[in-house]
Amino acid sequence: MSRNSVSAGGGDLPDTSRSSLPLPKREVLADSVYEAVKAMVMDHVIQPGARLGIEALSRTLGVSATPVREALARLEADDLVVKRSLSGYRATELLTRAGVEELFEMRLLLEPRAVALATERIEEAGLDRLEALADEMQALPEEGDTYADYGRFAALDQEFHDVLAVASGRTLLAAAVERLHSHLHLFRLSAIAGGSPATVQEHHRILRAVLRRGPRRAAEAMEEHLRLSLQRQLDRFASVAGADED
């Protein structure tokens, strides 16, 4: 993964960030600051484990400390930063291979059950949304190596799974799926070459099963998707390990 990583530990962030992050008017300032800091974390401009200084971020983005604090609180809810007593906010560490395997273990327990329930309960509005998400994902260009390139695909991917979880009618189950924040953590490792077309095809198989109101087929399609996605992630780790040995 080739990214220009710099530490955001108590000093200023790179001036190049300022020119690429134009901030809009007051009413959407908080969202803009959130997306700006999120992009820095996802792209490793702020390195995993590095401290996020509120004053440094404020200077870099040309805003007051208030929207920066709000952004960091939202990112803490996303599990992209962690707040520690006496040391402030730090970017969370990247998932390890074991962490990825554990994440998918949880997803395999939760999401096939969720989609089976959703198949029996989802309403027309939910089906329309799933179809729109699948179509938009298919229309997007192949993602690049920065959050600006793959961010939209990642958001659509997450929403596809969340819509199905919510449609299950099980509040705790849907909340558990959402709390995993799996797409943010996985895409933060870097985009996978060829991952988008495979994901789109697998989503369409899930969608067809849901449209046919087949709970078992939908659960099987979701399980297959998750196992294939896990294998793509493990292949990434193997590729990185092989490159380190060369």
Image (tube, grey):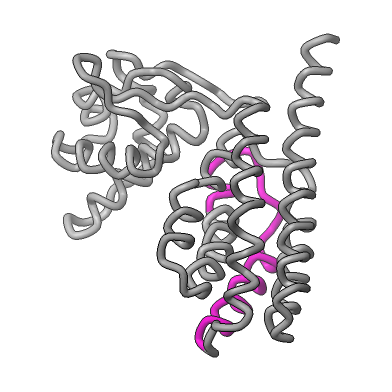
Q: Nearer the viewer, residue 104 or 42?
A: 104
Q: Is residue 238 magenta?
A: no
Q: Nearer the viewer, residue 212 or 32?
A: 212
**Residue 212 appears at what percent x and percent y?**
73, 86
Residue at x 40% of width, y 26% of height:
91
Image quarter of the C terminus: top right
Residue at x 34% of width, y 40% of height:
75
Looking at the rendering, which quadrant does residue 158 occupy? bottom right
In the displayed structure, 212 sits above or below 152; it is below
Q: Which residues are magenta?
A: 125-151
Left or right side of 3 for 40: left
**Residue 179 appears at what percent x and percent y?**
44, 49
Looking at the rendering, which quadrant does residue 88 occupy? top left
Q: Majority secondary structure of the magenta segment?
A: helix
Residue at x 42% of width, y 58% of height:
175
**Residue 27 appears at what percent x and percent y?**
18, 60
Left or right side of 17 for 197: right
